Amino acid sequence: MEADQARGQVSALLTQWCDALVRLQVDLPDCARLDGGILCPACGMIHGRSFEAVYPLMHMARSTGRQDYLTAAKRLFAWERNLRSADGGSRNDFKSDWQGVTAFAAIALCDALDLHGDLLTAEEKAAWEARLFEMGGWLSAHLTEQTPAYLNYYAANACAMALLGRRASNDAWLALAKRLAAHCLRHVIESGLVYGEGSPTTAVSPKGCVAIDLGYNAEETLPCLTRYAAVTGDTQAQARCVELWRAQLLWMLPDGAWDNSVGTRAFKWTYWGSRTADGCQAALFALGREDPVFAEAAWRNFALLRSCTHAGLLAGGPDYARAGEPLCAHHTICHAKTLAAALDAGIPSFPRVPLPSDQPAACAEYPELDVFRLAAGAWRMDVSGYDFRYAGASHAAGGCISLLWHADAGPLLAVGMVDYALREPHNQQLSLHPETHRCVCPRLEAEIDGRRFSQTQSAARLSRSEGPDGAGVHVETALCGRGGEELPDGACTLDYLLTKKALTVRAQVRPAVAGRACFVLPLIGESATVRVLQGTLQSAPARIFNLSPGFLAAEYRIAPDPDGRLCFTVAVEQKG
């Protein structure tokens, strides 16, 4: 890929995004609380982090010479005063007192000043810099290793303190940056994944699992740590970041998606990343100067971002537009920053090379996640027993298949939140079509006296199994209510076998509940065929959608035979 070609395409997408943000900027001069903010068409509000678009807008003002971008950036800066606290922090939203997002605001403002500050008048520049150093004072006092926060905030403040410390020649801020980065780099499991996206960051589940979110790692924590290392010249941290990125790349699918189907914050999974994170392009393109695999990953993810853009906004998933769901501006605001940063730093030329997921191991086990990842030919699959609970959020567990992907068909199963709920009301959407907004987790379940009992709530036991021509997972699980209470006679087993030809699922429930049980299979796309070998397909599949990770699906319901047994296959007609 030639640098000019890559830059042209990245710049074109950033232009679409920034033009949409300018269109959504509120023009109400008589209402200072709203004037200059960016109105979100999905959430019907102004997200507090709208301010961070100040940087990509300044980049666009520089690259195009257009005054409207510069004016929009100045109006955003003026609007930000509505979120300021008396001690210098910046609140998450009008109705949120969380101020850890000051780190993200400070990075955006610092980049706007460092790279494009000469577009401002001397008076404006002085005001922007004064606000930046107010943020720095708050961050140095309130976001340290002792502050209760998720790991991505420590990483973000390591980056912020490095940038601000360099600009202000403040040794104390630089020292804090180094401590925070070192703190983050101690949160690494044996496989090289970063943990700490839970409270506290060192919490351990009953199974011994730790708090890992692949989306936040890829789009916030690792990019911030990588930038900290580059800004400060911390070569030891830089080398460690490269190692961590290599482990992270194992979780990028061949189509550029970040597989966060088992993350603690899977309710924010958007297939391309995470709803409120920034993105990976700036960090990975920079590392791509030394190893093209990183630039390849940046490019594939960029292509996915572009395919999910509609009417100038980055959708929260591939099927939002087809499902008739509005698009949240938050994703565009955050991801515009990383595209601007990549362009400002310079996108290198790079040869097109394979990703690790193009030729993965047949079976990989992640004990700290209680997840098996299988591959056979064109197929990729995750099976999850991950029992770390984030604020009650229900990600895929219980021995469910959290992801099924095929090279010719793309995602066929992809699970975000099992029971969708507004864990962060300001950062999530409600569907406009609640009648078809349903769980997309493949699962055994039973309806008993109006209550749903499902394997998704079970503390399942997973073990690797071997088939004649593929890899498999054996699951011992149970049907449980939402509170984890096990249904009498609810014990059940599943066997998944993945071969180059198909996925075969066998399940056994107790005969006592067989008449009220079924396997729910929400199949994405129209490329796969389902063949029921044992049991009964209850009816024609219903068309459903789920906001996380944003896919339409055909919901098959397969009932077991009277003895409680069922078996079916999922296959895709091979190309060529």
Image: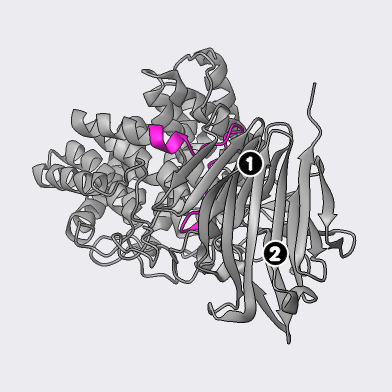
Residue 247, placed above or below residue 475: above
Residue 483 x, y percent position in the rendering = 53, 80
Residue 306, placed above or below residue 22: above
Residue 235, placed above or below residue 508: above
Q: Is residue 381 visible?
A: yes
Rendered residue at 20%/28% (across/down): 235
**182 magenta-colored:** no
Rendered residue at 64%/76% (across/down): 490
Residue 489 x, y percent position in the rendering = 65, 79
Q: Pick whichever, 74 or 161, lies toward us.
A: 161
- The residue singled out by tag 1 in the image is 467
Secondary element type, mark 2:
strand
Q: Pick whichever, 110 or 148, lies toward us.
A: 148
Q: Quadrant of the N terminus?
A: top right
Secondary element type, mark 1:
loop
Can you name the residue that lies furthest to the left here?
A: 171
Rendered residue at 68%/32% (across/down): 407
Q: Which residues are magenta?
A: 246-265
Q: Pick whichever, 224 or 125, lies toward us.
A: 224
**247 magenta-colored:** yes
Q: CA distance from mark 1 to mark 2?
A: 18 Å
Q: In this image, 358 relative to 102: left or right?
A: right
Q: Quadrant of the C terminus?
A: top right
| Residue type of the residue flagged with mark 2 | Gln
Residue 144 x, y percent position in the rendering = 20, 57
Dominant secondary structure of the magenta stretch? loop
Can you name the residue that lies furthest to the right here?
A: 540
Label 1 neighbourhood size at 10 Å, few (<14), some (14-19), many (20+)?
Answer: few
Rendered residue at 71%/55% (across/down): 506
Residue 508 is tagged as 2
Residue 382 x, y percent position in the rendering = 57, 47
